[in-house]
Amino acid sequence: MEKLRGGIIGIGGFGRMTLAGMIEAPSVLVTAIADYDYELAQAKAQELGAKAYRTYEELVEKAEIDALFLALPHHLYPPLVRLAAERGLHVYKEKPLARNFQEGLELVELLERKNLRFMIGTQRRWTPGFRTMKEWMPEVGQVFLARGQYVFCWGPDFRWRGSLEQSGGGALLDMGYHTVDMINWLVGLPDEVYAAASNIARPNTPYPYETDDTAVTLMRWKNGAMGYLLTCWVSSPAEERALIHGSEGTLVADWEGVTLYTPQGE
């Protein structure tokens, strides 16, 4: 089987997991690596028999690859995606799609015009609990309520995530992207959406703090079903799960497993 030659930019933080997935995939060969820490990129490239590049642009412009994998702060994505499109490279990037609607639309349309694949890292679809939940959806009958909840406590410094210009958003757009994708994947796109967000949970922080730390999103579908998303990244206890309520039962899932309840709770 001919392997897809992949180049990755950003192997610290979440990029470590992206790289691990590329290494494990039998259809992918890692041939190029770049990171702001060039020594780290060199060490990993030597380990894998790949080539390290000093700059992100140099990798995209010169590396012999078929697809580009990106795990970077949000504001660094657009120019690299555009450059990849000009080179005819397929693109995988970590969520979110973009910092705002117009930026996302531009990038999607650009890669579509070039007939290139553009994939966003919505990994929850492949975790055991949520994947099984999707398979068991027919068991609950007519869905009338969908709930997504994602709460945890980020460290004291949001760094670039606290900058609206660099990140585009916080608890909802960044980490909440997974929760939004989950509900869309399980139930379908809602027809009405309402949301409220705030960033008052850390009044004494010395760090940039322009993005939301808490958000509640209310949804409604044409058939009358309703749903909500709760996203918060400044509190505990940690929780990430989805709940689907239907006429014949309820599904409750997290990363590891799923439980099917009767309407009476059995």
Image (cartoon, rainbow, N blue to C red):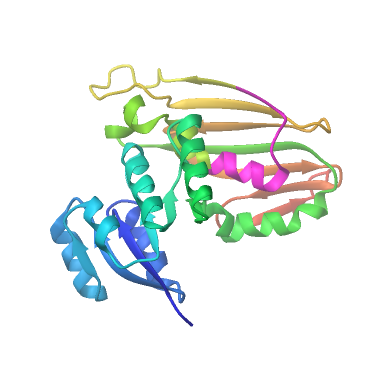
Residue 96, position as x, y percentages in the image: 46, 41
Location of residue 240 in the rendering, given as x and y in whole percent from the top left corner: 54, 44
User: Among all residues in the image, which is located at the extreme left?
Assistant: 39
Q: Specify whether 146 is left or right of 149.
A: right
Numbered marks: total? 0
In x, y percent, where is residue 219? 68, 29
Q: Position of residue 164 (x, y in %)?
A: 36, 25
Residue at the image point whose x is 52% and y is 42% from the top:
109
Which one is in front, 120 or 160?
A: 120
The residue depicted at 27 percent of the width and 53 percent of the height is: 12
Q: Is residue 221 magenta?
A: no
Q: Specify whether 106 is left or right of 73.
A: right
Determine the residue positioned at 27% across, 65% down: 32
Q: Is residue 186 magenta?
A: yes
Q: Is residue 87 above or below residue 222?
A: below
Asked if residue 215 shows in the view, the reply is: yes
Quadrant of residue 4 within the rendered picture: bottom left
Above or below, 194 against 236 in this view is: above
Q: Residue at x 61, y 57 (%)?
A: 129
In this view of the protein, can residue 237 be seen by the observer?
no
Residue projecting furthest to the bottom: 1
| Range shown magenta | 178-194
Left or right, 89 with respect to 128, comes to: left
In depth, the one of 25 and 172 nearer the eye is: 25
Q: Nearer the viewer, residue 143 or 43?
A: 43
Residue 174 lies left or right of residue 210; in this view the side is: right
